Amino acid sequence: MKRTVSLLALLGIMLSVVAAQSAQVTIIIENTAPKKGDILIAVFNTKESYEQNNPSWRIKIPGDRENPRTTISLPAGDYVITAFQDENENMKLDTKLFGIPREPVGISNYSGKGIPGGFDKLKMAITDGPVEVIIKLSRI
């Protein structure tokens, strides 16, 4: 009986440590065109995953209202979050010549001016507590 209680106490401590090392992140997408397609969000946690366009998390949220949002739990670390409105519902970002997006796009920690840059320029640190990330979509 003592061993069971000790194991449960240890499990509780381990779970509280894990919970303390993650944050509830609310991603808010601004400048959407309601009813013009769902919003596809990609969350990258390494430079390599960003460069290879291989996100650690993919999220699809309905684009049927103004400023749609979603909340996810992320472990503490550095992240780049990208989003686009999939206007033609083909589940991919359509591009023009030279890879310029045809659909509205946005990136975390990007001012909207000039070339966005790589992971190191765009990353944002997520630590603890609730965090709000606002991504403004725009046409390039």
Image (cartoon, rainbow, N blue to C red):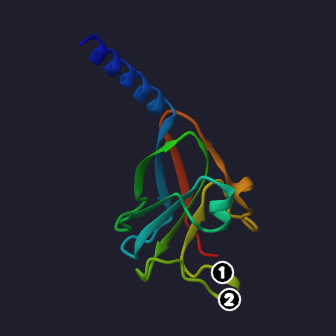
Residue 16, how many percent across, how many down?
Answer: 42, 26
Q: In this picture, is 48 found above or below 96?
A: above
Q: Secondary structure at mark 1?
A: loop
Q: Amino acid at mark 1?
A: Ile
Q: Amino acid at mark 2?
A: Leu
Q: In this picture, is 53 found above or below 126?
A: below
Give the quadrant of residue 12. Answer: top left
Q: In this picture, is 129 found above or below 109?
A: above
- Given residues 51 and 14, the one toward you in this image is 14
Residue 62, how many percent across, how many down?
Answer: 35, 66
Q: What residue appears at the point 44 percent right and 79 percent down from the top-left corner?
A: 87
Q: Quadrant of the C terminus?
A: bottom right
Q: What residue appears at the point 51 percent right and 45 percent down from the top-left corner?
A: 132
Q: How many marks?
A: 2
Reading the image, the residue beneath label 1 is 100
> Residues at badges 1 and 2 in contact (C-beta under 8 Å)?
yes
Extreme residue toward the top, this view:
2
Extreme residue toward the left, this view:
1
Reading the image, the residue beneath label 2 is 97
Q: Secondary structure at mark 2?
A: helix
- Given residues 58 and 5, the one toward you in this image is 5
- Given residues 75 and 133, the one toward you in this image is 75
Q: Residues within 10 Å of mark 2 (few under 14, many from 20)?
A: few
Residue 117, how many percent across, how many down?
Answer: 74, 63
